Amino acid sequence: DSLVLKPLDDLFDAMILEDYDVVGSSLIPIHDKKNNAMNLPKKIDAFYTRDYNMVNAGGEKYAGVQGGFLMARPSEAIFEEYIDIVLEGDYREGQGWGGHYGYFFGGMQIQGI
């Protein structure tokens, strides 16, 4: 879960405004901004937090999305893809959805897709 203590305006601006300088902004929290700045996409489609507390040490390559905070740009195409994944129902224990992603705690739910 998340406790929001500041306005989310800058997060929305970063997603909506085409000329928003995410790297230059001191208001957008980016993990290890110094090393990750070059890897940021030009178009921001989502903001989320990772669930590092639920990672099994040495057992998982990536930390899952923390379901308490997830903000995404609306996309009918992505929504349809999400529905297809859920309806296919190919969740594999220890491997995730389709054997590719969501193999961590909460992976069968929104955190894994």
Image (spheres, rainbow, N blue to C red):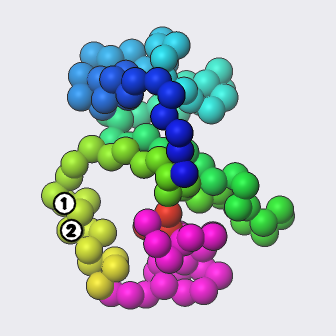
Please tell me whether the stretch drawn in magenta is mainly helix, strand or loop.
loop
Mark 1–mark 2 contact, CB under 8 Å?
A: yes
* Above or below, 65 relative to 22: below
Q: Does the magenta stretch include residue 106?
A: yes
Where the C terminus falls, by quadrant?
bottom left
Residue 79 horizontal/vertical position (percent): 23, 63
Which amino acid lies under the numbered mark 1 shown in the image of this protein?
Ala
**Rendering quarter of residue 21:** top left
Find the magenta span and give its range.
88-110
Residue where numbered disc 2 is placed: 80
Residue 41's tag is none
Q: Which residue is drawn at 63% across and 70% down?
A: 105
Which amino acid lies under the numbered mark 2 shown in the image of this protein?
Glu
Residue 70 horizontal/vertical position (percent): 42, 48
Determine the secondary structure under disc 2: helix
Q: Residue at x 73, y 61 (%)?
A: 55
94 relative to 43 in the view: left or right: right
Residue 46 horizontal/vertical position (percent): 38, 43
Q: Can residue 73 be seen in this view?
A: yes
* Above or below, 35 relative to 1: above
Between 42 and 26, the one lying in front of the other is 26
Residue 77's tag is 1
Between 83 and 3, the one lying in front of the other is 3
**Structural crowding at the residue carrying mark 1, measured as other residues with C-alpha within 10 Å and reported as few (<14), some (14–19) or many (≥20):** few
